Image: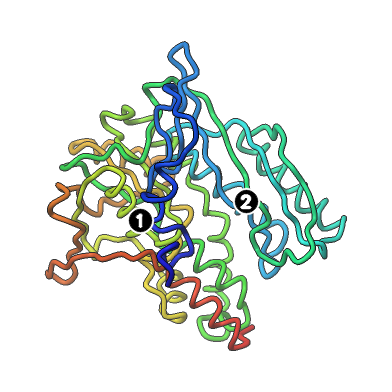
């Protein structure tokens, strides 16, 4: 594996630190939070005690899923990043680098879903760039950027955790990875795990937004004093997301394996595809770092809003490292960026699973 990137395909922490971070253009004093490893949103002071939060992510166009499902991922993975601020996104720009093979009717359908999903969450599409490119066969169809404005002191960033803060996880692990595997290989999942498991996994796909979770938390807890940091769960799963918060916040952490929430269907699918659910991409779940003493207020409020929330551990000082308790044994977490979902997916594809 090249030092240029980690095992998830993202740029490595060392490359970010040595190559990107020192060369980020002109330094402007109004940039309150700029590029940081593990921090998904920038925050810019726009005056009058207001700030703008900005986040970018790839767009998806995945033939094995379909146009509607790809549009859902494109919009909601962007919105999940924005949700970590404690506010909803307001505006979006999309750069579409589409395969030349995509027909006009298919593009019209895909864009109609992008429009509808943005409209549903109050996001205005303000511009971008659209083209078709020969040789573009990637499931990444370009990139998007979302924006919001909010009171400067109320925007949360994922580098605000402190030792002693508690770690709460919403929903369950491996929601999106297990659902995509089921939708990509439905005949296999139905045969091996049953029709009900397949249907539940497919239904889980549309539970992969964490915007509602974050807004509920921000409503009941004071930003930056009780609700310290949030991070959506993408590559590397729940443990990967906690590692990114810890790195960004210069902290360590201790979590308990038995407390990490997993649904029965995700357990079945990840076990069948030989995936560790704790490290598998899990959009829909949100990591929330909160002040000790706020946990009951948060968990009870989320329960009232039909959001499952689980206390899984606490932040510690940096020198204590990243640790997990498994069957009463404390172990060091040495996360290298590997998400087992990708290997499992391509292995199944090469085997010809249907």
Q: Residue at x 30, y 30 (%)?
A: 224
Q: Above or below — where is 111 with respect to 201?
A: above
Which percent across, then down, holds residue 9? 48, 64
Is 177 drawn above or below residue 141 in the view shown? Answer: below
Other-residue count near label 1 (Cα within 10 Å), few / some / many at <14 / 14–19 / ≥20:
some
Taking the view exactly as shown, the residue that stands out farthest to the bottom is 351
Q: How far is the residue under mark 1 from the one under mark 2?
A: 28 Å
Q: Position of residue 291 (x, y in %)?
A: 22, 36
Note whether 180 is above or below 90 in the view shown.
below
Residue denoted by label 2: 74
- Image point 45% across, 30% down: which residue? 43
Question: For the point 23% across and 65% down, which residue is it?
Answer: 333
Q: Which mark is residue 14?
A: 1
Image coords of residue 190 (percent x, y):
58, 80
Q: Is residue 324 left or right of residue 182?
A: left
Across and down, in percent, residue 210 comes to 47, 46
Q: Quadrant of the N terminus?
A: bottom left
Element marked by disc 1: helix
């Amino acid at each position: 594996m090249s030092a240029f990137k980690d095992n998830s395909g993202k740029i490595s922490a060392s490359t970010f630190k040595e190559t990107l971070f020192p060369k980020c253009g002109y330094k402007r004093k109004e940039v309150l939070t700029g590029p940081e490893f593990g921090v998904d949103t920038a925050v810019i002071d726009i005056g009058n005690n207001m700030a703008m939060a900005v986040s970018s992510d790839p767009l998806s166009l995945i033939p094995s899923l379909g146009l509607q499902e790809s549009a859902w991922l494109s919009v909601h993975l962007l919105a999940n990043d924005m949700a970590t601020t404690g506010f909803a996104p307001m505006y979006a720009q999309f750069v579409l680098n589409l395969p030349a093979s995509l027909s006009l009717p298919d593009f019209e359908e895909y864009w109609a879903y992008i429009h509808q999903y943005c409209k549903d969450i109050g996001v205005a599409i303000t511009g971008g760039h659209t083209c078709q490119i020969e040789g573009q066969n990637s499931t990444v169809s370009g990139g998007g950027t979302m924006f919001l404005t909010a009171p400067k002191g109320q925007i949360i960033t994922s580098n605000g955790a402190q030792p002693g803060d508690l770690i709460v996880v919403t929903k369950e692990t491996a929601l999106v990875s297990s659902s995509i595997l089921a939708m990509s290989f439905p005949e296999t999942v139905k045969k091996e795990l049953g029709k009900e498991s397949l249907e539940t996994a497919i239904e889980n796909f549309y539970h992969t937004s964490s915007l509602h979770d974050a807004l509920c938390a921000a409503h009941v807890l004071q930003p930056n004093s009780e609700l310290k940091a949030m991070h959506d769960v993408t590559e590397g799963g729940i443990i990967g997301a906690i590692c990114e918060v810890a790195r960004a916040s210069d902290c360590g952490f201790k979590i308990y394996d038995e407390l990490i929430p997993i649904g029965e269907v995700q357990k079945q699918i990840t076990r069948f595809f030989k995936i560790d659910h704790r490290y598998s991409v899990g959009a829909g779940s949100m990591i929330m770092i909160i002040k000790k003493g706020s946990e009951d207020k948060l968990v009870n409020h989320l329960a009232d809003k039909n959001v499952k929330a689980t206390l899984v551990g606490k932040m510690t000082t940096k020198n204590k490292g990243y640790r997990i308790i498994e069957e009463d044994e404390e172990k060091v977490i040495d996360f290298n960026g590997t998400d087992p979902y990708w290997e499992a997916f391509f292995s199944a594809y090469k085997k010809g699973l249907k």
